[in-house]
Amino acid sequence: MERLEREKEFHDKRFSKKEQKSNLYEFGLNNWYKKYIELILKSNESTLEIGAGMESCFIEYPVLRKNLSRSNAKITSIDISYVSVKKCNELNLKNIKFIVEDAHELNNIEDFSFSKIVGRGIIHHLNISKFTNTLKSKAGKNCKYIFAEPMVGPFYIRLYRFFTPNLRTVDEQPLRIKDIKLIENSFLGKKNRIYYGFLTIPFALIGIKSKLIETLDYFILNKLRLGRILAWAVIISNV
């Protein structure tokens, strides 16, 4: 089965049932989610959302929809899952268009005049070289981008992935620094990286969430600049 078909099958099944967020994501990567939304809220620009499915930030966060209603910005959210796109369109959300699309190609988008491209937990599903080449041909280099992605991380994160293979497809590859640079070099503007999920992850596994832990986590990963080898997740942007 080709990569595209494997991804479709996996996500059609996943979006056919209701999932519950685990403490691992709710506690361990809470600030990662929050920062991603905060960056998107900085402007009302026309936006392309890559591979969000039912987890589209415009569905999960009403504040983004409210922000949209104050502008004429268009929002297009794509996903490879037919099940997901069907459910999203049934919500009849104003100013947001959901379409089935392969992020490697982006051929079904007639008007590519987006000022901003965003995505959370999607690029590590893709052939990154092919995806970035498509962005270079479709989007202007002055386009803004905000991507929130998992990284390879330290040994215990790799161990967790090893023992939970059913949570992901065989094609998923957490980002390495070379992948991040490939994405960053597809656009102009400043390069911002914020790393997350070193101390917060093991504490989340036992159900503990703490501001002190989050502060220490940020200090170790970003102030001491150890994120590239210790972080579970990263936000990269030129915003």
Image: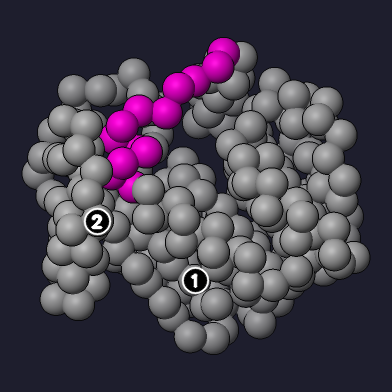
Near mark 1 (Cα within 10 A), the count class, few <14, some 14-19 or many ≥20, is many
200 versus 43 height, above or below = above
| Residue 19, magenta (yes or no) | yes
Dot placed on the residue nearer the N-terminal end, 1 or 2 = 2
Q: Secondary structure at mark 1?
A: strand
Number of on-image labels? 2
Please state which amino acid type lies under the numbered disc 1: Ser
Pick whichever, 83 or 54, lies toward us: 54
Q: Which residue is mark 1?
A: 237
Q: Quadrant of residue 46?
A: bottom right
Splitting the image into 4 quarters, where does residue 80 fall? top right
- Give how far across and how far down residue 184 sits, in percent: 46, 73
On screen, residue 53 versus residue 222, left or right, reads right
Residue 104 screen position, x and y as percent:
61, 48
Name the residue tied to disc 2.
211
Report if residue 90 is visible in the image.
yes
Q: Is 146 left or right of 172, judged from the image as shown?
A: right
Identify the main secondary structure in magenta: loop
Assess whether residue 167 is covered by the magenta stretch: no
Which amino acid, by three-letter code, is at mark 2? Answer: Lys
Q: Give coordinates of residue 141: x percent, y percent.
A: 64, 79
- The stretch of residues the image draws in magenta is 17-29
From the viewer's side, name the closer residue of 233 and 21: 21
Q: Nearer the viewer, mark 1 or mark 2?
A: 2
Which is more toward the observer, 152 or 156?
156
Residue shown at the point (63%, 46%) measured from the top left: 61
Q: As drawn, is 27 to the left or to the right of 202?
A: right
- What colour-coding does the image apply? one colour
